[in-house]
Amino acid sequence: MKTLLLARVHLGAVAVLSVLTLSACLLIAGMPRTMQASFNDALAKSLRGSNVQQVDLAVAAVARGEGSDLQAADQFTARDGAFRKLLPPMLKGAVKAPDVGTSHMSAKTWDTPIAGSGGGKYLNIGWVSGYLSRVKWIEGRAPGGPASTKYQGLEIPLYEIGVVDEARSEMGLELGQTRIIGESHYAAVKIVGVFQAVDKKDPWWTHNLDVLNVDVVQPPGKLGEERYTTALLAPESLKVLSGRERQLRYSWVISTNVDAISRLDPAEVSEAVQGFGRGVSLQSSPELRYVMITTLPDLLREFMTQLATAQTVMYLVLGGLLVVALGVIVLAVQLAVDRMDRTLSLMRARGGALKQVVRTGAGVVALSVVPSALAGYALSYLVPGPVLPIVHIAPVLVLLVAVAYASAVIAREHRTPLNERRDDVVAAKPSAKRITLEVLVIGLALGGAYLLRSRGLTSDVVAQGQDPFLLFVPIALTLAAALITLRVYPYPLRAFARLASRGRPAVAFLGLTRAARARSFAVLPVLVLLPALAVSVFAAVMSSGISDTQKVASWQRAGAPYKITSDIELTAEAIERVRRVPGVTKVVEAQAGRVQIGFSTERAEVLAVDLDQWRDLLADAPITLPATPPGDGIPVLVSPELHGRGTMDIGWQSRMKVTEKGVAASVPGFFTNGKFMIAPYDTNKRAGTRVTVNTLLVSGDTTEAALVAAVKTPNAVAQSQAGTLAKIQDDPLTGTLRLILTLVTIALAAYALVAVIVALVITSADRASAVSFLRTLGLSPGQAQGLTVMEISPMIVLTALAGLALGLGLPAALGPGVDLSAYAGDTAVGDYDLDLLTPTLLAAGLTAVALLGAFAQTAISRRRSLGSVLRVGD
């Protein structure tokens, strides 16, 4: 009953504590769910963007004859079922059924030459399950069963095959032809059908591009080209297709469900896949050795490495938010305890036991925070995303901190009856042990920051987990900054107070003196304001750094506001149509190609362009182009891989000699590594031929669609800097990172303002009493307001400066520990521009709230009668 009565009497303090508890539990429990949901979405998107050959689980084996041949489709199906039984439980729900998605089985030969082609043409043959539903026969029919024929006096198998339409022109294969394949073991193939893919974009074809295309390769050391394709067989042909006579490979592809995988723990999935591979290898026999082929663990490992950075940044800012939220709740608890102080003192003076007093006061706090924590916990379930342990832990932690702090403060204040004292007369001197401990903390923080920058981080965060230094250093630096601020805080105030004491007005002296002799719990706002400002400034700097680097990365990828590329020549008419597109202001012509270096098989990429015109087109873009190479002949800039060769003979549209006149590490929009060179635009004119333009660099206010429509050239592609930037920004992980940083900045700013307000309310009683005393001595209302401002402002200003300095210094202190290049187009985010707009607005808001609070306090104090504040004998 006493608890309920106290709560009703001090309803204002209880309401403030309840609201703060609800918001803290909602934020701290809800944000991790949003964060984890984004991680899952990002993983799914990353896997969807990967080649299905990388994410699917494929089992392969080489047939060697002697009982290892699989001669019927049923045998493939049986082994597929056996492999699927080996899948770990967590993977069984993350794969698709046989013949669903990209799941299939196959038997294919490789490097099977066409007799009489001189090793220039290879016609492999193979069976792929389910291919009949994915091809359409444009000529002829589907292959039938095998037969036999005579060749060089030997009876050899005759296979009916279907070939892709492209093979007719590329390899001279025509419908009705019979060709001999093989070297020592011959076979005949009869082309009975020509097909096309029903849907070339079907991911199923990714595993069978050798069937859909003719591959043209140039072997090392050879000038001639080789052509490869794979023809389709009927399943009945398996009974005569043997690994004894051919290089024959069997495969079973198990299609994965990337959405299901994204909801699982990446590390556990990676381990499960590797375990499946070990299980598959144990099924091997001397005749057939099975091996699993997939890069899914590597993709997951790469994602987890990228994720580790995002988690580090997010947990740093969320950890700061948690600390600040707990600090504000502690301030609110202090406010409630102050309001109950006289009642609890009276209980203690009338014989109440200390346990009873503590139980009553802590009960009021518990009555305030328990329903609010439960409400915040329940509301967090409205936030989409998986439930993480922190969702359950955060509300419990808030409850424990609030109740424990209330119990400790009440027990300390009321350990003896009527324990009245004044701690605002002189400042307490810290003990030697305390000073030693504080110096040790500061030294460890500075040493940790130095080691973090000098030694770097754990290189393998996936296997070894986060480097403790990355979590220790920000916490230690924040604590060190708070300790330094608390220790340094009184000294400048005392110095200013001495200066103020020499003047006639007493307001400044009294205000600064009261600030220097603040009660012990008045340091709590410092412990809240400093991390709040530091983390919010850190988040703002990181978000700004990501945004700026994304823009730079988009310019580096695009190379111009708009870029048009084509695999065939762009005619003069097409270029003129582009110039006339509404909004286009400038067009720079260029030619991109591939050249032969010398008379060897070495190749290099080349771009012929007028660098001066290109530089004018870029105007104020945040990228730079290499300087135009000077010199006679054909001066070129070369990549580091080609550096030092001097004059080179190259074959482009004709033979020509180029001379190295500089090195370009990269070329925006075209080259980032490898062998490349930049030549003058009229290079081919100097060789006596017309320049063949296949690339246009465009500036102006237009659209990609308008440019493509104006070109009217098949396969022409337009790319814009704005579209490239949108693609970089359109990433769930990047979006969530910036969203969390923004939300945390706003939340911390709000908590900082609340801390100032609560601090004003906590000290309002003492301030009102002091002002009332001074009013009896003739203090005017204006002077009372000035006194309040002088008392409050130093703490806010000094703490704001310390928090601002720490927040601006954290990105540099963390250094190599925060690699955000994955969220900025793979461009390193290193030079953080000091954007002081957000910190300035935050400091201005705090100052405004402090001033408004000061005026409100003095206005309230002015309305009070002296008899309501001063006691008899004062």
Image (spheres, rainbow, N blue to C red):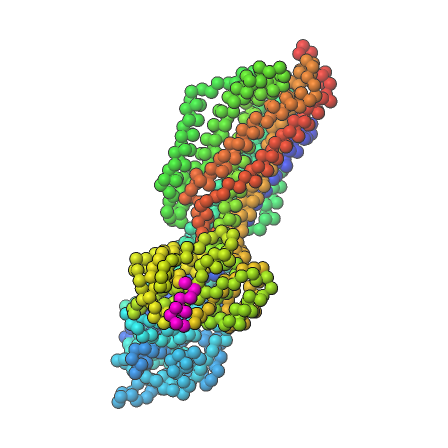
Residue 683 colored in magenta in the image: yes
Up-down: is 495 above or below 16?
above
Segment colored magenta: 680-689
Q: Position of residue 547 (x, y in %)?
A: 52, 49
Up-down: is 387 above or below 652?
above
Residue 143 colored in magenta in the image: no
Question: In the image, what residue occupies the spot 44% across and 23% down?
Answer: 434
389 vs 177, nearest the viewer: 177
Question: In the image, what residue occupies the spot 48% across and 18% down?
Answer: 429
Left/right of residue 380 with respect to residue 1 in the rendered view: left
Residue 747, can we see it?
yes
**Image quadrant of residue 396?**
top right
Q: Position of residue 479 (x, y in %)?
A: 47, 32
**Image quadrant of residue 742?**
top right
Residue 399, can we see it?
no
855 vs 321, nearest the viewer: 855
Where is the C terminus found, in terms of image quarters? Answer: top right
582 vs 455, nearest the viewer: 582
Question: In the image, what residue occupies the spot 46% across and 58% down?
Answer: 612
Q: Position of residue 692 (x, y in %)?
A: 44, 70
Where is the N terminus found, in terms of image quarters? Answer: top right
Q: Position of residue 519 (x, y in %)?
A: 56, 21
688 vs 445, nearest the viewer: 688
Question: In the image, what residue occupies the spot 69% across and 14% down?
Answer: 778
Q: Residue furthest top?
A: 873
